[in-house]
Image (cartoon, rainbow, N blue to C red):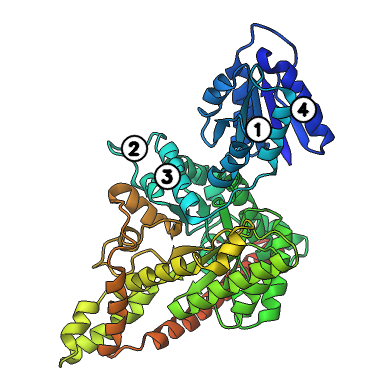
C-alpha cells in the first residue's frame, strides 16, 4: 500500500518515527515533510499537499500529524475527496474506514505517544471499507454535497450534481477520442459530477466510423501491417485506457464504487460461453486498469461467463438486460462468483453493475399496445392506459429484487468479507418517442446505490430542466400491477424481453461488422495512399 505522511514542527519527531515504522512494515511511504525542524512552519503548507495526493490517488492513505491533530484535520478536510478524522482510539481508527471510507487520519503528537500512534496507524491501514447499502447511501450524500460546491451555470444548483444526494451516479453512454483530448470529458467530471463511461459496438461505430478522429491512427497501423480487427482492438483499448486514467481519481476517492469505464466483448460471442470468457480475460489483462469493466451480455450463455469472470476477479458490466427473471439469474451468477472466490480464500471486493435497458422496452411494448388500442374492443382502453409504462415499471420491480437479494443472509456473509453490491444501472435512457419527456428515464428512477448512464443529449437536457427527487421506490406495488395487466391487454412480456435481447445482440453485431468494414475501407485507402473522404 502507498502511504503518505506529513507533519508540522509539533509533529515532526512522531512523523519521522512513524515513517520508519511504516517502511519497516513493508509500506511504500511518501514523506511530504516537514524535512527540517522549524518552529515557523504552518500545518496547512504541509498537510494540504498530502491531502491532495490522497484525493488524486497518488497515495492510497494519508497520516497527518500536528500538535493536537486538530489543525491537520481542519486543513485536510478542505481538500475535495479527502475524508479525514482526528483519531485517539483503535475502534475509530478502523471503524472510520469500514463505515465512512476514511482515507486520512490525523494524530496529535502532544497527546499521543509513539506506541499508541503506531497502533492507531496500523488499525487504520489494515481496515477496509464495507460497501453496504446504508454506508454507500450516506457517503453518496457527502460526496454530492462536496460536488455541489463546484460552480455551475445558471441560478440554481446543477440537477446532475443533485442526483448524487439521492445516491445515484451519472455515467456517460458515449466515448470518442476527441472528447478526451479536448477536455470535454474532464469538464463533465468537474462541472456535472460525471462518474463513469459506458461504451458498446454501436457507440464505437459512431465514434470511429463516423468521424475523422481516428484516421491518422488507422493509417499508421495499416502501414505497419495491422488487420482491421487488430486496429479496432487497439483503438478501443486505447480510448478506454485513456478515459480510465481520467476517472481514476474518482475511483480511488470513492473506494472503488465509481470511476469505471466499460468495454464490451465481441457481440458475435453472445451465445458462446467459453469464447466470451477467453475474450473477457484478454481484455481485462490488456486494459490493466482497476477501474475498467468488461461488458458481457445477459444471454443464457452469458450467465456462466459472468459467474466465472466474477470468480476470477474481473469487474463485469452485465449488458443487454431486459427481463426481471433474467435479472434474478444475473444476481445469482454474481453472488455465486463471489462465493467461489470466498471459498478459495480470495478477496470478494469485485465491482459489477447490471445494465437494465429501458427505452427499447417501451418502443416494442408501445408498438404492440398501439395495435391493441387500434383494434378496439374491451382491451383498447387498457392498452392506451399502459402505453409508456412498461419500462419504468420493470425497472422499479427490478430494484425491489435488488434490495431483497442484497439484504439476504446469503449476501450478508459475503459483505462481511468486503463484498460490494452489484448496482443496477439504467441504460438506454435516451427517450426515443418524441411525445415523452426527454428525461423520462431519469426522473422516475432516482434511487440509492444506482447508476444512470445517459447519452450526451440526455445529460444536457437534465442539466437544463431536471428535477431530482427519490422516486425509484414510489408506487413499487403498482409497478408490479402494471406488468401483470400487460397480459390482460394481450402482451406476453416474456416474449417481448426475449425478442429485445435477440434484437440487441443482433444490432450490436451489425454495428460491430459495419465498424470493421469502415476500418477496412480506411485501411485500404491508407495502403493505396489515398486520402480518406
Spatial CA span between label 4 and label 1:
11 Å
Name the residue that disc number 3 marks. 141
Q: Nearer the viewer, residue 63 or 485?
A: 63
**Do labels 1 and 3 touch, CB within 8 Å?**
no
What secondary structure is marked by label 2? loop
Name the residue that disc number 2 marks. 153
Q: Is residue 64 above or below residue 207?
A: above
Spatial CA span between label 2 and label 1:
34 Å
Q: Position of residue 185 (x, y in %)?
A: 50, 46
- Mark in front: 3 vs 2: 3
Q: Position of residue 450 (x, y in %)?
A: 45, 58
What secondary structure is marked by label 3? helix
Point out the tag, 4 or 2, that comes first from the N-terminus: 4
Give the class, few, some or many, for how many residues have Cα within 10 Å of label 3's Cα (few <14, many ≥20).
some
Spatial CA span between label 4 and label 2:
45 Å
Residue 62 numbered tag? 1
Name the residue that disc number 4 marks. 19
Spatial CA span between label 3 and label 4:
34 Å
The C terminus, quarter of image: bottom right
Point out the tag, 3 or 4, that comes first from the N-terminus: 4
Q: Position of residue 338 (x, y in %)?
A: 64, 67
Give the class, few, some or many, for how many residues have Cα within 10 Å of label 2's Cα (few <14, many ≥20).
few
Q: Position of residue 159 (x, y in %)?
A: 33, 46
Q: Is residue 122 above or below residue 255?
A: above
Q: How many marks?
A: 4
- Mark in front: 2 vs 1: 1
Amino acid at each position: 500500500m502507498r502511504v503518505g505522511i506529513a507533519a508540522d514542527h509539533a509533529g515532526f519527531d512522531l512523523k519521522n518515527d512513524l515513517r520508519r515504522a511504516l517502511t519497516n512494515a513493508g509500506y511504500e511511504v511518501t514523506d511530504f515533510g516537514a524535512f527540517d525542524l522549524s518552529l515557523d512552519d504552518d500545518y496547512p503548507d504541509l498537510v494540504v499537499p498530502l491531502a491532495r495526493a490522497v484525493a488524486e490517488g497518488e497515495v492510497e492513505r494519508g497520516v497527518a500529524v500536528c500538535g493536537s491533530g486538530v489543525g491537520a484535520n481542519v486543513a485536510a478536510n478542505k481538500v475535495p475527496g479527502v475524508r479525514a478524522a482526528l483519531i485517539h482510539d483503535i475502534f475509530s481508527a478502523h471503524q472510520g474506514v469500514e463505515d465512512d471510507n476514511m482515507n486520512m487520519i490525523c494524530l496529535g503528537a502532544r497527546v499521543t505517544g509513539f506506541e499508541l500512534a503506531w497502533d492507531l496507524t496500523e488499525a487504520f491501514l489494515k481496515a477496509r471499507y464495507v460497501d453496504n447499502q446504508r454506508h454507500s447511501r450516506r457517503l453518496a450524500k457527502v460526496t454530492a454535497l462536496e460536488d455541489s460546491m463546484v460552480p455551475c451555470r445558471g441560478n440554481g444548483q446543477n440537477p446532475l450534481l443533485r442526483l448524487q444526494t439521492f445516491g445515484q451516479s451519472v455515467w456517460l453512454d458515449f466515448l470518442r477520442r476527441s472528447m478526451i483530448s479536448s477536455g470535454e470529458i474532464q469538464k463533465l467530471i468537474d462541472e456535472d459530477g460525471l462518474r463513469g463511461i459506458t461504451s458498446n459496438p454501436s457507440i464505437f461505430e459512431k465514434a470511429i466510423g463516423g468521424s475523422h478522429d481516428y484516421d491518422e491512427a488507422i493509417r499508421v497501423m495499416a502501414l505497419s501491417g495491422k488487420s482491421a480487427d487488430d486496429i479496432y482492438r487497439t483503438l478501443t483499448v486505447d480510448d478506454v485506457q485513456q478515459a480510465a486514467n481520467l476517472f481514476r481519481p474518482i475511483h480511488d476517492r470513492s473506494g472503488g464504487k465509481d470511476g469505471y469505464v466499460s468495454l464490451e466483448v465481441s457481440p458475435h460471442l453472445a451465445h458462446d460461453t467459453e469464447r466470451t470468457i477467453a475474450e473477457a480475460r484478454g481484455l481485462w489483462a490488456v486494459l490493466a486498469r482497476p477501474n475498467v469493466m468488461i461488458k458481457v451480455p445477459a444471454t443464457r450463455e452469458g450467465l456462466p461467463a459472468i459467474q466465472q469472470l466474477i470468480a476470477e476477479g474481473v469487474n463485469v458490466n452485465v449488458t443487454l438486460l431486459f427481463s426481471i427473471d433474467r435479472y434474478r439469474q444475473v444476481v445469482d451468477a454474481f453472488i455465486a462468483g463471489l462465493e467461489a472466490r470466498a471459498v478459495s480464500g480470495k478477496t470478494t471486493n469485485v465491482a459489477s453493475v447490471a445494465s437494465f435497458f429501458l427505452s427499447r422496452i417501451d418502443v416494442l411494448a408501445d408498438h404492440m399496445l398501439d395495435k391493441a388500442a387500434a383494434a378496439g374492443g374491451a382491451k383498447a382502453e387498457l392498452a392506451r392506459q399502459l402505453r409508456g409504462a412498461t419500462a419504468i415499471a420493470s425497472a422499479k420491480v427490478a430494484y425491489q429484487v435488488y434490495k431483497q437479494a442484497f439484504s439476504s443472509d446469503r449476501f450478508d456473509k459475503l459483505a462481511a468479507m468486503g463484498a460490494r453490491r452489484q448496482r443496477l444501472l439504467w441504460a438506454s435512457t435516451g427517450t426515443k418517442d418524441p411525445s415523452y419527456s426527454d428525461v423520462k428515464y431519469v426522473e422516475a428512477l432516482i434511487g440509492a446505490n444506482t447508476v444512470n448512464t445517459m447519452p450526451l443529449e440526455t445529460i444536457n437536457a437534465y442539466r437544463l430542466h431536471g428535477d431530482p427527487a427519490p422516486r425509484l421506490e414510489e408506487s413499487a406495488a403498482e409497478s408490479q400491477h402494471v406488468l401483470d395487466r400487460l397480459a390482460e391487454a394481450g402482451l406476453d412480456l416474456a416474449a417481448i424481453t426475449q425478442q429485445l435481447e435477440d434484437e440487441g445482440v443482433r444490432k450490436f453485431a451489425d454495428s460491430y461488422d459495419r465498424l470493421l468494414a469502415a476500418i477496412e475501407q480506411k485501411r485500404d485507402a491508407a495502403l493505396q495512399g489515398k486520402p480518406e473522404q
